[in-house]
Amino acid sequence: MTTLEILLVSIALMFIAAVVGAKVQRTVKFIYPCDPATVALFSLCAALMYLQQPLAWFWYLPVLSGYALGFFIVGRTSYIMLRYLQSQSRCSEARPWVLYHDRQGHVCVQEQSWRQLLKRLFCGVHHYVFCDCELTANWQESTHHPFLPKFRMPVMYIEYLQTDEEEICLRQSKKLPRKDERPRGWYVKQRISYIKAAHGSQVPLTELIMDVQALQKANNRVAELEKEIYWLQKEATTVTTSLIGMFIKDNYAKSPLVLAMASRLSRLNGKEEKTTKEVSE
């Protein structure tokens, strides 16, 4: 092959690898190239380079460099830094969160682990995130460590973070469950995170300068939201009880036992009305 042909083939391989790398990065939503596809590709290339002659390594260089270019630059996944302020332990922890939306528009986070990735890709199980405000980085944090250059990063301050797990049934078995046994099927664990923002950090700086009651207003807003949550939970309980009553009425209204009890109660009510009428006369 001539030099021009080698150059054209190298550019073509690099372009194809860059497209593949960008597609993989947008699919897996990993910050670092440690996802299964990337690890498998680099492991395969390393094994082939080990088995072949050193001069045959040339064709792997444009593939690996193009893949890295597409993974880190073309298909770069955005993330936000959440700094968790733990007042009791006097500790703060910052870690990146890769957020995305599912088909229904719910906010989800992609954990940087193979298990959570495979759950999302093959089972459709997402890690949902619920927050009392919009998840956006509205602070700039500047850090300068010794012997390292100064760097700035956008962060969001939170004061409450809890992650719960619940089992959901993806496919229910046709076999009837035994006594005191849950329905048979394929169950997987789904994670749900609840976040409460540090509302003092959500107050705009201009409002904080112009209004001395800005933090007090923010705290009052938090109290109003907590009251609203309480009443919504209470209303949900009332609605659930009403629905259960309607279900029982619709399904068991014609039961002989229920009809007998209703007849008995009507007779007792008739006797009470008759007695009351006689006493009044």
Image (cartoon, helix red, strand yellow):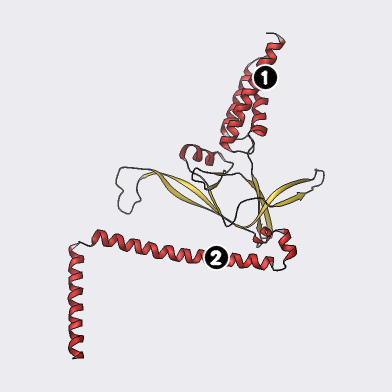
Quadrant (top left/top right/bottom left/bottom right) for the N terminus: top right
Which residue lies at the image location 65% right of the left edge and 67% below the top edge? 217
Q: Is residue 63 toward the left or the right of residue 268 in the image?
A: right
Counting from the top left corner in percent of width and height, residue 257 is at 19, 65
**Location of residue 216 with respect to 11 vertically, above or below:** below
Which residue lies at the image location 34% right of the left edge and 48% below the top edge? 183
| Amino acid type, residue under disc 1 in the picture | Ile
**Disc 2: which residue:** 226
Question: Is disc 1 placed on a helix, strand or loop?
Answer: helix
The answer to which of marks 1 and 2 sits earlier in the sequence is 1
Q: Which mark is residue 249?
A: none
Q: Nearer the viewer, residue 265 or 59?
A: 265
Crowding at mark 1 (Cα within 10 Å: few <14, some 14-19, many 20+)? some
**Location of residue 44 with respect to 264 vertically, above or below:** above
Counting from the top left corner in percent of width and height, residue 153 is at 72, 47
Residue 157: image quadrant is bottom right
| Distance of label 1 from label 2 (alpha carbons) | 59 Å
Which residue lies at the image location 68% right of the left edge and 52% below the top edge? 138
| Amino acid type, residue under disc 2 in the picture | Glu
**Disc 1: which residue:** 11
Q: Is residue 279 toward the left or the right of residue 27 in the image?
A: left
Q: Is residue 234 toward the left or the right of residue 63 in the image?
A: left
Quadrant (top left/top right/bottom left/bottom right) for the C terminus: bottom left
Residue at the extreme right of the image, as rendered:
147
Question: Is disc 2 placed on a helix, strand or loop?
Answer: helix
Residue at the extreme top of the image, as rendered:
1
**Location of residue 231 with respect to 126 vertically, above or below:** below
